[in-house]
Structures are given as structure tokens and as C-alpha cells.
Amino acid sequence: MQKFTIHQGLVAPMDRENVDTDAIIPKQFLKSIKKTGFGPNLFDEWRYLDKGEPGVPESQRKPNPDFVLNQPRYKGASILLARKNFGCGSSREHAPWALDQYGFRAIIAPSFADIFFNNCFKNGLLPIVLPEATVDLLFNEVAAFPGYQLTIDLERQVVIRPQGEEIAFDVVPFRKYCLLNGFDDIGLTLRHADKIRAFEAERLATKPWLAHTMAS
């Protein structure tokens, strides 16, 4: 998993409340057993005018010119500004996969659905909860200033506006530790790889019949 330390990026506004995971990545794209390739279908039903189906190249689709991510001023955005209850609906982990694979590194909103919120951390995305009034201010600034960027310093737990003002945010220490070090659940386990190998070696030495059982 990619580490998150300090990130500066262009901000794209998603000015809708209660954006659910089916809107983030529609159900027909969940058929894939891979964890990759979901970026082109992020917000598929809003992003394109034609109906999306798995396997259709992005070059053959009809983009919706009115959708925010298709507007030239937000091309390359890596910070998503959203409204309350972002990521509600089903618990599909494909939603943070799609956001990450599109290029987003952080999402700022007044509130998130719990399961989506936790899934973001497990996949290298930083969800930041800020007061609704602060989010309103950021929406106004994004609209007023093309090329609007924010800097996010996870170690210091601040969002830095272009003029230098810092906005503090909370993050659970364990989640912060994982993001700073790029540890997903597997990465956390592999920190103890030497102990795991030693345990397995000792177990096979004392119970050699397990080698035959495991091989079969």
C-alpha cells in the first residue's frame, strides 16, 4: 500500500450529499476478481452518457461534459471534496479501489459512512472529516479559484489552504500509523514474518507429519 505523508493536489468538488457506493462504482463492474482496473469506471453512470459495461475501453465511451470530473479545470485532481454521508450504501471495497485507481489520495467531507470510511484507510486513501461550515468554505474557494490546491500533512494532521491557513483534523493513531508507513492488513502481518517462519519451522520439527498433511 502506498504511504501517505504529505500530499499537495488539485481539488475536485463533488457537490452532492449521500453519494453511495453504487454511484462510486456501479454493480456491473464488481464481477472482476482482480483489485485493479476500476479507475475508468469511477462514477460511471454520471461520468458517461452511454451505459457502461465491463471490458469496454474508455476510448469508446461517451463522456458527459457536464460531469465535474470531465471538466478540464479538474483534470488530474487528487483530492475529492464531498458532502455529508459520502460512501453510504453497500460495503463494497471496490469503491475505495476505484477512487484510488482514478488518482485520488484523500477525500474531505463533513461525514462518511462507517464501512466506507474504514475501507479507505485499508486501501491507502485518507478520509478527512471537517465541520460542515469549513467544507462549505472550501467548496466556495474551489469554485472561485481555478487550479485550487490543498496540502495535507498527515503527520501534523492539518489541511493547509493556499494562503497558508491550517485546518486541523482528527485521525485514529493506529490508522495514522498504517497510512504513514504504507501498511495494509497484510503488511501489518508481514512485519512479523521472521516470527511466523520460526513458528512454522518449530511446529514442523515437533510435528513432522504436518508437512505431509499440508502438502496434500
Image (cartoon, rainbow, N blue to C red):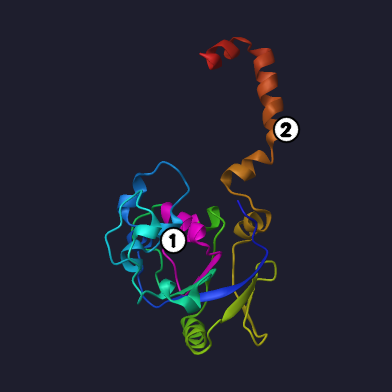
Which residue occupies 54% across, 60% down? 125
Mark 1 lies on residue: 114
Q: Is residue 132 above or below residue 77?
A: below
Query: Is 58 covered by the magenta stretch?
Result: no
Instruction: Determine crowd level at label 2: few under 14, some 14-19, many 20+ residues with C-alpha closer than 10 A.
Output: few
Amino acid type, residue under disc 2 in the picture? Asp
Q: Position of residue 160 (x, y in %)?
A: 64, 79
User: Could you tell me which secondary element the residue under label 2 belongs to?
Assistant: helix
Q: Residue furthest bottom?
A: 144
Residue 58 vs 184, above or below: the answer is below
Q: Is residue 115 visible?
A: no
Quarter assignment of residue 15:
bottom left
Q: Is residue 26 above or below residue 16?
A: above
Position in image of residue 168 (x %, y %): 62, 77
Which residues are the magenta region?
93-119
CA–CA distance between discs 2 and 1? 34 Å
Label 2: which residue? Answer: 194
In the rendered view, tell whether residue 167 sits above or below residue 157. Answer: below
Q: Is residue 75 left or right of residue 5?
A: left
- Identity of the amino acid at label 1? Asp
